[in-house]
Amino acid sequence: MDKEQFGYIKKQLLIVLLVILAMFLLFAVGLMIGYGVIGDGDNIWSVLSPEKWQELINKFTGK
């Protein structure tokens, strides 16, 4: 592989990583808006805590 091909591959991988990062960021923002603004959550940051996720999983699985 020459430098030009390596540079192209590097640029494409960077774009893919940026898109994945943007997806996770938008997912987290959507969770916070849905829980804190639309829902009845008091603290928008609590939806990102492991305790809240365990509570939600237990609610849906019936445990």
Image (cartoon, rainbow, N blue to C red):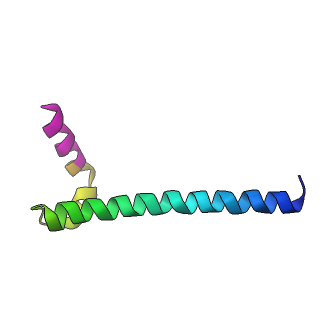
Q: Position of residue 46 (x, y in %)?
A: 21, 60
Point out the stretch of residues depicted in magenta: 53-63
User: How many numbered marks have been drawn onto this rendered protein structure?
Assistant: 0
Q: Residue at x 52, y 60 (%)?
A: 19
Residue 16 location, quadrant? bottom right
Nearest the eye: 47 or 50: 47
User: Which secondary structure type mostly characterizes the magenta part of the structure?
Assistant: helix
In this rendering, the answer to whether 62 lies above or below 46 is: above
- In the rendered image, residue 59 lying in the magenta stretch gets the answer yes
- Pick out the residue farthest to the left: 40
Q: Quadrant of residue 56?
A: top left
What residue sits 17% from the left and 44% below the top?
A: 55
The spot of residue 37 in percent (x, y) is 16, 68
- Quadrant placement of the C terminus: top left
Q: Is residue 55 left or right of residue 26?
A: left
Left or right: where 14 falls relative to 5: left
51 falls in the magenta region: no
Q: Answer with left or right where residue 44 lies relative to residue 62.
A: right
- Image coords of residue 58 (percent x, y): 17, 37
Could you tell me which residue is drawn at 83 percent across and 57 percent down? 5
What residue appears at the point 9 percent right and 62 percent down from the top-left corner? 40
